[in-house]
Amino acid sequence: MAKPLELDEIWVERIKQILEGLEYGSVQIVVHDGKITQIDKTERKRFETPASSQSQTPLQAVKSNKQKSKV
């Protein structure tokens, strides 16, 4: 049977601090034996493209011409 999660006010405050200002991303809480042991934060930054660069041609893939060597 799983142990009940021990969550005290200190952990609640830590989680609030990590979430503060997070606009895009995720927070992962790791629990071992019913106790929080780790909090991971992954933050994403999104950048808008300037209007002037949208009028340029999009990036194109470049095909590689690798030669096979005969042995």
Image (cartoon, rainbow, N blue to C red):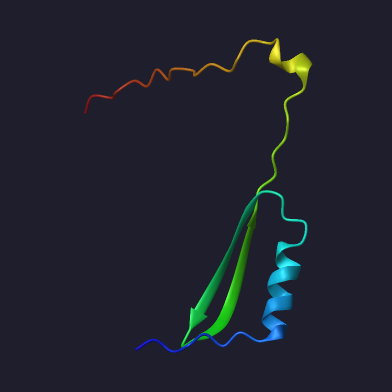
Using residue 29 as the reference point, say whether residue 19 is left or right of it. right
At horizontal 67% and vertical 80% (from top left) the residue drawn is 11
State the image quarter where residue 58 is shown: top right
**x%, y% of residue 68?**
29, 23
Whether 28 is drawn above or below 51: the answer is below
At horizontal 63% and vertical 52% (from top left) the residue drawn is 25
**x%, y% of residue 30?**
52, 74
At horizontal 78% and vertical 14% (from top left) the residue drawn is 52
Total numbered circles: 0
Q: Nearer the viewer, residue 51 or 66?
A: 51
**x%, y% of residue 66?**
37, 22
**x%, y% of residue 53?**
73, 17
Position of the N terminus by quadrant: bottom left
State the image quarter where residue 26 is shown: bottom right
At horizontal 77% and vertical 17% (from top left) the residue drawn is 51
Whether 1 is drawn above or below 53: the answer is below
